[in-house]
Image (cartoon, rainbow, N blue to C red):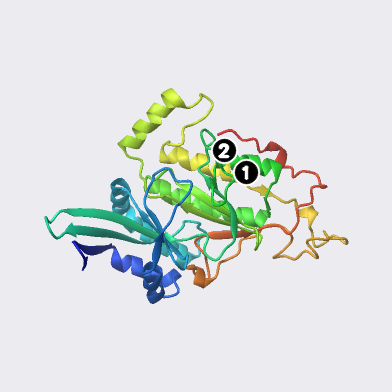
Amino acid sequence: MGSKGKHKYSVICLYASEFRQLRDRCCPSEVDYIASLSRCRNWDAKGGKSKSFFAKTLDDRLIIKEIKRTEFDSFMKFAPNYFKYMDQCYELHNPTCLAKVLGIYQVIVRATKNGKETKHDLLVMENLSFGRNITKQYDLKGALHARFNSAGNGSGDVLLDQNFVNDMNDSPLYISMKSKRNLQRAVWNDTTFLHSINVMDYSLLVGVDTQRRELVCGIIDYLRQYTWDKQLENWVKSSLVVPKNQQPTVISPKEYKKRFRKFMDTHFLCVPDHWCSHRLSNPCKLCGTATEEENGSLHLKPRERGDYDDDSRPLAKSLEQPKHADKSRPSSPNHGRNGFSA
């Protein structure tokens, strides 16, 4: 507890021991975590509709978000399942791309004059963009209706599903079959878990790191359970707003899981193996001699421990981009069919 001028502050750490155990697995140290949190600045998180308060630590490692009471209550209900799932991912080396929640706090502000209290529920999570040169970001929910950002040309603007589909048609980002299988397994595991705790409306945040030629992927915004108000929103949008051949963004966790998986399977495109095979006598000039690990296509690559990730199995995936984009080659067999309509 502390005081400043006309107010007194107290902080409650929810699930303190469980979060500490999680941070011991993936953070450089608890001292570094606290040092990061002690120096923050307000942050304009573009792309979100919630208008929530955001802050970012000055070292760029962590993001602080004020969450709604419904989100706080949802997390309190499924928190034991979350910690169990995180433990399983580390211990069994199961692929996952959940962006890690590293702490939940209640900050209570009390006015010394009249005793009036206000509560702020705060979430601390890893910053997927830490230490990277992200030039473009996509927030993907697996739906196309009302999922286009027409003003997404400025620095830091977050693009949406229809932007991603359009860009994959115009300038596709290819990944290898191995990378796609790893991403599919991670998405499958995570959506199975989120469905089991009745959560929907989450997103896959995809950042393009042009300097490292990597895609950085992580599932975010997974605190919201499918409660009666979300069911009502689904009914209203299905009946009055959304075209008949499309689904609303808000649907049941089961349907959301199926649609999310299908979108990721469809729109992450693969490089044909024969383009940059190490068996070719004349390999691609820009790729050089292809190897098992680096063959000119995308592959999953663990992030450094200093990036708040475990060495053996990162929870947020990064995919290395191909070192060439030879437009004289024919389109990928998958490319011509990616005009997917959810």
Residue 317 on image: x %, y %: 55, 59
The numbered disc on residue 267 is: 1
Q: Measuring 39% from the left and 64% from the top, which residue is drawn there?
A: 40
Q: Residues within 10 Å of mark 2 (few under 14, many from 20)?
A: few
Amino acid under label 2?
Ser
Image-quadrant location for residue 318: bottom right
Name above or below for residue 162 compared with residue 322: above
For the view shown, which residue lies furthest in the front direction?
Answer: 5
Q: Between residues 265 and 135, which one lies in front from this camera angle? A: 135
Query: In the image, which is nearer the foreground, mark 1 or mark 2?
Result: 2
Classify the position of the C terminus by image quarter: top right
Residue 267 on image: x %, y %: 62, 43
Q: Is residue 311 visible?
A: no
Residue 200 on image: x %, y %: 42, 43
Name above or below for residue 29 compared with residue 320: below
Residue that label 2 marks: 150
Please state if 212 lies on the left or on the right of 185 as rendered. right
Q: Measuring 37% from the left and 61% from the top, which residue is drawn there?
A: 83
Residue 280 on image: x %, y %: 85, 60
Classify the position of the N terminus by image quarter: bottom left
Image-quadrant location for residue 82: bottom left
Q: Measuring 36% from the left and 41% from the top, which residue is drawn there?
A: 226
Amino acid under label 1?
His
Helix, strand or loop for disc 1: helix
Q: Measuring 42% from the left and 23% from the top, which residue is drawn there?
A: 240
Q: Is residue 331 visible?
A: yes
